[in-house]
Image (cartoon, grey):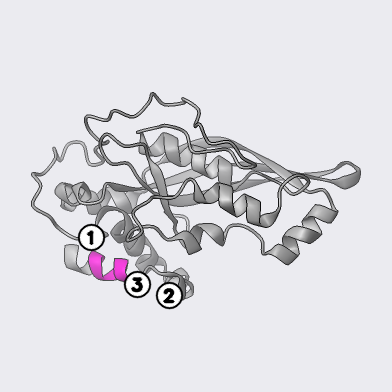
Amino acid sequence: MLKRLTDYSLRWSPTRRVTVIGIGLACLLALAAATAFLTGRDDHPGTDASDPVPSPAHSSAAPAGQPSSWSGPVAGPPKISDPVQFAKAAAKMLWSYDTRTTSQAQHLTGMRAWMTKEDEYGDWASVAAQIPDPVLWSRMADQEQHATATIAEGHYPAAFKEALAEDPAAITKAYIYAVTVTGKQTITWARGGTGAEDRSVTLAVQCRPSTDCSLVAIAPRVAP
């Protein structure tokens, strides 16, 4: 099982994302691989199987909810050591923007601050793909389009928990967690136009012990 999941993780890349989207089961396996088994088995002792999704232990990160020191057009990453809470904050960031005051390049720069500094794990292309290209962003700006988001809930997907239950020690290599977040995005544009839609996303977040969480990737499909 571990080898099969690791093989799938190697295929979770921007050039293969379209293929993965078309195969439901493979997508779920790829998600589990890219989170719990991205680097394969290591020699760390196992965790208690009764708690299939362990949180990072002995974290010295600031308490959940403490604001980031980052200042810019995009809300900075919070100093949080809990994967679910960080993923909820990241989803809110992804679903919020303001083309009236921020260029597409500035917005991407702000998003980049959320990414893991461990380049071997981060998939920036999957995150940047959430934002319209410069041409579309410009057209949105012409309409003064901006969006806010409210978060309903976040949870570990079933596929991630099942994969991790088979080998609890695997996560101690990279400490990458899969989290699915649901919420609502409200969009407003010129002359009083407004609309809202339900949103959901599955993110991979890294929460190493004694380190604030960071964003790793966006899954090609939402995992339940």
Which residue is tagged 3? 11
Q: Residue at x 57, y 40 (%)?
A: 92
* Discs 3, 2 touching: Cβ within 8 Å: yes
Badge 2 or badge 1: first in the primary sequence: 2
Q: CA distance from mark 3 to mark 2?
A: 6 Å
Crowd tier of the residue under label 3, counting other residues whose Cα lies within 10 Å: few below 14, some 14–19, many 20 or above = some
Quadrant of image for the N terminus = bottom left
Badge 1 or badge 3: first in the primary sequence: 3
Which residue is tagged 1? 39
Residue 148: percent from left, percent from top: 67, 39
Residue 216: percent from left, percent from top: 40, 53
Q: On the rendered structure, is 143 left or right of 136?
A: right
Foreground: disc 2 or disc 1: 1
Q: Residue at x 34, y 72 (%)?
A: 11
Along the line of sight, the residue nearer the viewer: 72 or 80: 72
* Discs 2, 1 touching: Cβ within 8 Å: no
Residue 159: percent from left, percent from top: 32, 54
Residue 31 vs 58, above or below: the answer is below
Q: CA distance from mark 2 to mark 1?
A: 19 Å
Say which amino acid is labelled 2. Arg
Foreground: disc 1 or disc 3: 1
Q: Which mark is residue 114?
A: none
Q: Is residue 9 magenta?
A: yes
Say which amino acid is labelled 1. Thr
Crowd tier of the residue under label 1, counting other residues whose Cα lies within 10 Å: few below 14, some 14–19, many 20 or above = many
Residue 164 vs 26, above or below: the answer is above
Which residue is tagged 2? 16
The chief SS type of the magenta part is: helix
Residue 8 vs 187, above or below: the answer is below
Q: Is residue 39 magenta?
A: no
Residues shaded magenta: 5-10
